[in-house]
Image (cartoon, helix red, strand yellow):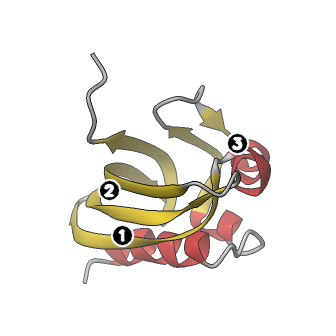
Amino acid sequence: MDPHEHLVLRLFTLIDGHDWEALPQLFTPSVCYERPGYAPICGIASLLAFYRGERVVADGRHLIRGCLGSGCEVSCWGEFSGVSRSGEPLHETFADWYWISGGRISRRKTFFYRPAI
């Protein structure tokens, strides 16, 4: 497996395990995360604030169906199943695109598979 693909798969292990202390090790300090429904989340402090308190997810697991790296870019796709902070069940199919710099994620962009326009 490509080291950058391994980095992305490690990300989901940390997110699903709520390991917010280890999460910054995977990102550049100036990381920018673009996600539908949110303004861009830029910088480690903002990323941690998102995961600790702003994200609607209370708990859940990602099932990665595929991961493909090429140079300093990685894409992955899969499904998320879990529960929201208000107790509602969640299930979402997604795809992510990552840009890697110096062995860390510098940018992430998430796409969801549902009608938007």
Q: Is residue 7 above or below residue 107?
A: below
Is 37 placed left or right of 110 in the picture? right
Q: Residues within 10 Å of mark 2 (few under 14, many from 20)?
A: some
Q: Which mark is residue 4?
A: 1
Residue closest to the eye, 19 or 6: 19
Check the image and name the residue furthest to the top.
117
Contact check, label 2 and label 1, Cβ < 8 Å: yes
Disc 2 versus disc 3: distance between alpha carbons?
20 Å
Q: Amino acid at mark 2?
A: Cys
Check disc 2 and report its element: helix, strand or loop: loop
Q: Which image quarter: residue 4? A: bottom left
Q: Which residue sits at x=63%, y=36%?
A: 41
Disc 1 versus disc 3: distance between alpha carbons?
20 Å
Q: Is residue 39 above or below residue 5?
A: above
Residue closest to the eye, 103 or 65: 65
Check disc 3 and report its element: helix, strand or loop: loop
Marks 2 and 1, the one that precedes in the sequence: 1
Check the image and name the residue furthest to the bottom.
1
Q: Amino acid at mark 3?
A: Gly
Q: Which mark is residue 72?
A: 2
Marks 2 and 3, the one that precedes in the sequence: 3
Query: Mark 2 or mark 3, which is nearer to you?
Result: 3
Q: Amino acid at mark 1?
A: His
Q: Is residue 39 above or below residue 72?
A: above
Residue 48: image location, x then y, percent: 74, 54
Disc 2 versus disc 1: distance between alpha carbons?
7 Å
Q: Which mark is residue 43?
A: 3
Residue closest to the eye, 90 or 10: 90
* Quadrant location, the C terminus: top left
Marks 1 and 3, the one that precedes in the sequence: 1
